[in-house]
Image (tube, coloured by chain):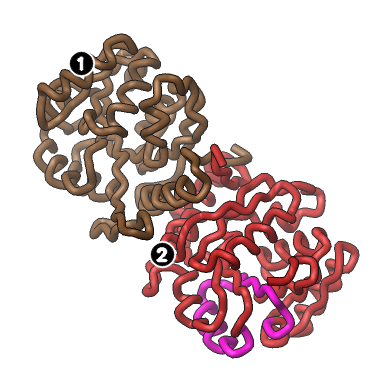
Chain colours: A red, B brown
């Protein structure tokens, strides 16, 4: 696999808070970033807003998918399956990083949704048999990612998947962001609980008025 | 609710590694501990082994349940439902702390089992309608708990449940153990992923040769 420096990172759903925030951090880390959105004009707008941060351009999701060596999926859960199914040819051979959390919300806060395939990551792997699918960045606060005054993101990023070379690469990607550390988090079959754990962090944020993250100790 | 100092902590399944380890730490923190086991003689033996650590006695699970103000459930998942069903009257009115992780194991490591009620905690709550059921201590390494040379356990303990007074008490219990910190982790409906996350920690331990735990940042 090529070195991270030579790669383009595409962020699909890059006009939402999580996508915008990750695009900002990858660009600030010196990586070439392409924001994808259903609406190419909105993607271009989000990219311009990051012009001072680094090399970011915007286009539609399909062109962004084609441009990326690493393609981060940051769309809402509702659109996850349909988008990936439509982009399967464009994503063939690429490292696809799923950071989608299938969550529901009600008066009592957030809760994990049941996913037929087990998790968003496993759904992605089923829809993209020719891609190298990895899960990561599930638990990172979009508010911190997007805040230009936050210079260091104090969290570990659990990277999940069954392709060692791909998980190693995405651990390296995460570790390029100041404060973040990419930690191997287990196989795809253990992704559900990492996605669902975002509901717990939302509960914690509410109770403690925090933007919580997690660290793995003794690693 | 009474102060923690005046309470007795019973640990059912207290002859297994997790139960023995927790009994050791609670006793070392100055609390009165009763180890319960199916076999009262084995419980008494485990208690004698901790005689130098603090006030620990051993008896059968039913008598331990009756003796505890706080009753920690540390039995294997296989025996969880049957034990709790049989002890429901003895556990009425008590704070029951479930730390059971429904996990399966195969050549590729650990994975989360599907639990009909959603989680071990929700199963306990369904079987013990007259108890105050809380989830905690799921992710703490038994190896560290049991090691007398480890003087501080570097981990947060996520405490889950729908009874605020009970979760507050168990956060305080966790925080009595040097290094540990009890952090509110969400409602019972969000317990599954915390239990299942132990499978990820087992994967992490294997990859990094560690005894991993977790910390919540910004709290």
Q: Say if the magenta span includes residue B209.
A: no
Query: Which residue was labeled with disc 1?
Result: B57
Residue B179: x %, y % from top left? 51, 25
What is the span of residues highlighted in magenta in the rendered image? A65-91
**Residue B36 in the image: above or below residue A62:** above
Query: As rendered, which of B186 and B102 lies closer to the eye?
Result: B102
The single residue placed furthest to the top in the displayed view is B52
- Residue at 23 percent across and 47 percent down: it is B77
Q: Residue at point 49% right, 82% down?
A: A129
Quick check: is A80 in the magenta stretch? yes
Residue at the image point whose x is 51% and y is 55% from the top: A185
Query: Dividing the image into 4 quarters, which one contains the N terminus of chain B?
Result: top left
Residue A33, numbered label: none
User: For the point 44% across and 68% down, which residue is it?
Assistant: A119
Callout 2 secondary element: helix
How far separated are the C-alphas under marks 1 and 2?
41 Å
Residue A200 visible in the current orientation: yes
Q: Which chain does tag 2 point to? A: A
Compared across the picture, whether A37 is left or right of A102 comes to right
**What is the number of the mark on residue A189?**
2
A171 relative position to B176: left or right: right
Q: Nearer the viewer, residue A192 or B146?
A: B146
Evaluate whether residue A14 shows in this view: no
Q: Percent x, y for residue A66?
A: 70, 85
Which residue is more in the foreground, A173 or B79? A173
B182 or B102, nearer to the observer: B102
* Badge 1 and badge 2 in a common chain: no
């Amino acid at each position: 696999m090529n070195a991270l420096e030579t790669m383009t990172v595409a962020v699909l759903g890059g006009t939402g808070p999580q996508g915008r925030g990750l695009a900002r951090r990858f660009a600030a880390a010196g990586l070439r970033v392409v924001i994808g959105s259903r609406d190419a004009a909105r993607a271009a707008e989000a990219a311009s807003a990051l012009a001072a941060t680094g090399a970011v351009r915007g286009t539609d999701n399909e062109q962004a998918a084609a441009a990326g060596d690493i393609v981060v999926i940051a769309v809402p859960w509702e659109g996850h399956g349909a988008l990936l199914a439509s982009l399967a040819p464009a994503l063939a051979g690429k490292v696809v990083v799923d950071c989608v959390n299938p969550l529901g919300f009600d008066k009592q806060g957030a809760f994990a949704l049941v996913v037929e395939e087990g998790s968003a990551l496993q759904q992605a792997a089923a829809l993209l048999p020719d891609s190298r699918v990895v899960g990561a960045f599930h638990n990172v606060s979009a508010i911190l990612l997007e805040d230009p005054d936050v210079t260091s993101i104090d969290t570990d990023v659990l990277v999940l998947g069954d392709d060692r070379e791909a998980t190693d690469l995405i651990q390296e990607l995460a570790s390029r962001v100041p404060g973040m550390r990419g930690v191997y988090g287990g196989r795809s079959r253990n992704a559900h609980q990492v996605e669902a754990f975002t509901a717990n962090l939302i509960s914690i944020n509410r109770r403690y008025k925090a933007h919580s993250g997690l660290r793995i100790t003794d690693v």
